[in-house]
Amino acid sequence: MFRQIARLQSRGETFAIATIVDVEGSSPRKPGTRMVVLPKGRTLGSVGGGRLERMVKTACSNAMDTGEGALLTFGLEPEDGIMACGGKVKVFIEPVIPQRRLMIVGAGHVGRALSSAASFCGMKTLLADRNGEVFNRHHLDESVGQVAMEGAMEFFRDYPPRPTDFIVIATGSHEDDLIVLREALKTKASFVGLLGSRKKRDTFFKRLKDEGISDADLSRVACPVGLPIGAQGPEEIAISIMAEIIERSRKAE
């Protein structure tokens, strides 16, 4: 069970763990028994089956929605309508929700400013650039992961984005931006922000559609990325982008 939990965490999955912590009287399972519940109702392990398990699954689903754990008691007396073992079971419900991560490709003025803003907001951040020297020339917050990447394909292979992750592309080169965007749309990231104008977006979208990229995939792209607050300069642009990321995060919650 622990290996399965570790595997889910490494993949950035959302799930809930139900653990029997106490039993009074007769019960089908003993304290320490665990069951993992995934968002679509798939389970690993069992806390006893029947209506008890269905109610625990419902509690796990609620915990994943709210992000809050709970200690619940289930009576197993016949009149409770659950099971007829005659005891009581306390179950601790623990949601495991991966921390959202911001992946910035391009360590130029905007990319560095955005990494600082994200760090200030407490978001786990990776800043990547093909020019590794940029990390030596500029002081970055120690909490920001710094990746001297070989290319976009290799970066997303080594750091595979999860559905909860955000990608922002700001390489400073239209050609490189298109290459990164093409690779980003092959990942599971639900948000891909692209620094640039509407004209740039329309040009890129036409190219990608001609290559067979679907409208559904292109709908994940925000370009120009950032809330329209009239931002000027790298710092203000970074704040506008971070504001959009926060807005998206809160809506998702």
Image (spheres, rainbow, N blue to C red):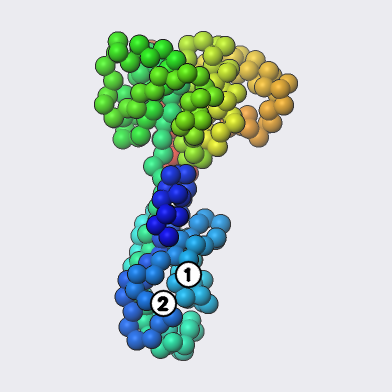
Mark 2 belongs to which amino acid?
A: Arg
Disc 2 to disc 1, C-alpha distance: 9 Å
240, 211: nearer the viewer: 211
Image quadrant of residue 115?
Answer: top left
Task: Residue at 49% x, 34% y: name it.
Answer: 160
Q: Is residue 8 above or below residue 214?
A: below
Task: Residue at 68% x, 28% y: name it.
Answer: 213
Task: Residue at 42% x, 48% y: name it.
Answer: 9
Residue contact between numbered discs 2 and 1, judged by CB atoms under 8 Å: yes
Please report whichever mark, 2 or 1, sits nearer to the chain's N-terminal start.
Answer: 2
Q: Is residue 156 above or below residue 251?
A: above
| Horizontal arrangement in the rendering, residue 183 relative to residue 14 (left or right) | right
| Residue 248 showing in the rendered view | no
Residue that badge 2 annotates: 29
Provide residue 82's location: percent of width, then percent of height. Answer: 48, 81
| Horizontal arrangement in the rendering, residue 141 relative to residue 191 (left or right) | left
Residue that badge 1 annotates: 46
Image quadrant of residue 42?
Answer: bottom right
73, 237: nearer the viewer: 73
| Horizontal arrangement in the rendering, residue 123 relative to residue 200 (left or right) | left
Q: Quadrant of the N terminus?
A: bottom left
Image quadrant of residue 119?
Answer: top left
105, 203: nearer the viewer: 105
Task: Residue at 44% x, 87% y: name it.
Answer: 85
Task: For mark 1, give the secondary structure.
Answer: loop
- Could you classify mark 2 by the number of other residues whose Cα lies within 10 Å: few (under 14), some (14-19), or many (20 or more)? some
